[in-house]
Amino acid sequence: MTLAEYRRRRGEPADADDQIAGDAHTEKHPGALEYAQIGLILGVITAIEVGVYYVGLSQTALVIALLAFSTSKFTLVVLWFMHLKFDARLFSTMFVLAFLLALSIFAVALATLGGKLV
Amino acid sequence: MSQAAATGHLETSTGLDNRKLLMWLFLSSECLFFGSLIAAYLLYRDSSVTGPYPDELFDIPFTSVSAFQLLVSSVTMVLALAAIQRGNVRAMQIWLLATALLGLLFVSGQAYEFTQFYREGLTLETNLFGTTFFVLTGFHGAHVTVGILILMSLFAVSLQGRIQKKDSLNVELAGLYWHFVDIVWIVIFTLVYLIQPGAGSN
């Protein structure tokens, strides 16, 4: 059965183009102002991140600070720009599971083969 | 009512649009791909028996500007999506073009950086640092290039009037890919460039 036939059976226009992931869905997305605010925060974090690199912190403090900044930026982009904060939970579950799996592979590889972060 | 039904898509067993689900599946697999490349880099960067070494080559101010460009491109990308969701095709075209240009700037910067490293004697075969660094950042650059092609295709299609408010999912899918490329760079910038062996004051 073609897509057009399927749509005709369902009483939909056969040439109906794919609809946007809908008003009900997109209304939940933030507006341009909120996106710009998040962008500004990301820019500030990046500037601090680079600044911290030159401040001359101890190695441990530097690594902790840089990882914290990087994690904050990562989280902001994923939650707001990629809409995981607003979208269906299945998307978040899939992504978080894959990310944790990648993190496990990363940790196991470094631990067993003798790699180090610093 | 499921999201798919609410949005005019065919009913799916998940109630979600299959194209979006597929994109998230793809991005999830990409997490493993880049996770492995980053782990390989961290494992082997200190195993080189000959130079040049990372601390002799990395130009942090230059790479910071590149990182900032990619971050701004994520903002312009999401503004393109916000524009088409409001039905403003013209604004979407401008933001798409801005995103593609920022991506092009990033890739040009990467090409410049690779050239500099090559002149300093670092190639894919020089040492383990060179091999893992070029493979990791090269694959990321290739992803950015594919993203630029997707954005330019969207721009070209929109010029023909074939992207309207109802088609905003196409922009959203391109955006998901673009933001993912951005978050990969957020991780690479920190783990590869900023956190180096011996970094810090002691």
Image (spheres, helix red, strand yellow):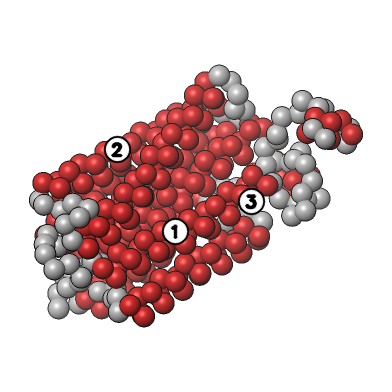
| Image quarter of the N terminus of chain A | top right
Horizontal side of residue B202 vs B76, given as left or right = left
Q: Amino acid at mark 2?
A: Leu
> Is A13 located above or below residue B202 in the figure?
above
The answer to whether residue A41 shows anywhere in this view is no
Residue A113: x and y, percent? 33, 77
Q: Quadrant of residue B99?
A: top left
Disc 1 marks which residue?
Answer: B33
Q: Which tag, 3 or 2, sits closer to the chain's start?
A: 3
Q: Nearer the viewer, mark 3 or mark 1?
A: 1
Q: Which mark is residue B21?
A: 3
Q: Quadrant of residue A105?
A: bottom left
Q: Amino acid at mark 3?
A: Leu
Disc 2 marks which residue?
Answer: B105
**Dot 1: chain letter:** B
Farthest residue toward the top? B160
